Amino acid sequence: MTIKCTMCGRRAVVKLRYARLSLCPEHFIEFIEKRFKKTIHKVKALREVDKVVVAVSGGKDSVTLLHLMHKVSKELGFKIIGLTIDLGIGEYSIKSVNKAIKNYETLGISYKIVNLKKEYGFSIDDIAKYRRRAGIRKPICSVCGAIKRYIMNKLALDIGVDAVVTGHNLDDIVYYIFSTLYTGRIEDLARISIYTPSKYKLVAKVKPLAYISEKETLLYVMLRRLPFNYDVCPYARLRTFHEQIRRTSNMLEEKIPGLKITYAKMFLEKINPVIYPYYVREEELKECKICKMPTTSEICAFCKIKLAMRRVLKR
Amino acid sequence: MIKVKVKLLRENKIVEVMLGENAKVRDLVHELGFTIEDVIVLKDEMPLIEDEVLEEDAEYVIMPVASGG
């Protein structure tokens, strides 16, 4: 038995149980584009931007983000610049960067590739190998995240854009909610937001895929036949807690369709604005003594990693 | 019972799965230990809805969604 598209009667390829819709490829693509636009319109600040950086790793989420941002930028009249960081994770990074470039060139978007090893002297593979010897205690994924945030912000400041747009999806948001609740980090929970305004040398950040799940981004790139890297980061297997939360939230979603999006909407739009003023202490930012980028301590997290890695790699 | 061939894309492995008559895509996904949110099931390169009935001897591809990026 073939299931028909709720909108046009053609063969459906996607069932969105939370929306009570079965959709054909064309109507699914239209649905995602509408949902994205709706989220973008919720961020009032995006109506006034001239130029934004879109962070593209080359995976399904960021490729979806780039194509959706490209459409929206034409309508709202702002410029987008792609940023891809070559993290130096062996074959995985080579493939990812190539896919990102293919998408930039298809869309005619100007872009910048930052090669971590060439620009700063170390790669993520170096960190994975020498992390302990360098005295870096944080898990590799946390270190990688800190590096990406630093480079994105630095480039955004250097070229003078109004915001950095990233491909965090609904599953990422749900993960943050579950994990911050589990660990009781209410301040971090209160900070989860689609839009983070700029603050002393920290460029504003936007997460417009917050209401689009990773299953939906995968379907979007596949149905639009967009080039993307399907490989899994070799270090992702180390994130067992993350994987357990993801599995659990998907199990709940199957039992209660719409649970993930309802959770995300409740926290981002109702709960967080209420708890934010009570739990978030605005930390005073100052310039890092080495790189002049914003930090709460004397030396920023990125420079600490850079110095530690330099010591180890010189040996 | 019906028998279907399944390609597990991440593992690059093909397995045969036996399921009851009129088994649906959802049943195949569960049999392999996934939830319907975890994977996309493809036939002839097109995604299938979990309510679709599986065809005897047909080949299906299981594409896990999580990328961990």
Image (cartoon, rainbow, N blue to C red):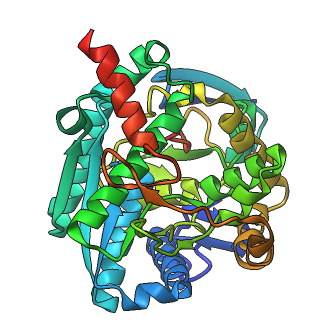
Residue under the point 18% across and 68% down: A109
The quarter holding residue A308 reads top left
Q: Does A250 sit above or below residue A107?
A: above
The quarter holding residue A204 reads bottom left
For this view, does A169 lie left or right of residue A226?
right
The quadrant of the rendering that contains the N terminus of chain A is bottom right
User: Which residue is at the front of the view, A185 or A294?
Assistant: A294
Image label count: 0
- Residue A231: percent from left, percent from top: 40, 35
Tell me if I can see residue B3 in this picture: no
Tell me if I can see residue A267 in this picture: yes
The quarter holding residue A69 reads bottom left
Residue under the point 32% across and 79% down: A71
Task: State the residue lying farthest toward the top.
Answer: A315
- Residue A138: percent from left, percent from top: 56, 29
The quadrant of the rendering that contains the C terminus of chain A is top left
- Residue A82: percent from left, percent from top: 25, 62
Residue under the point 14% across and 69% down: A108
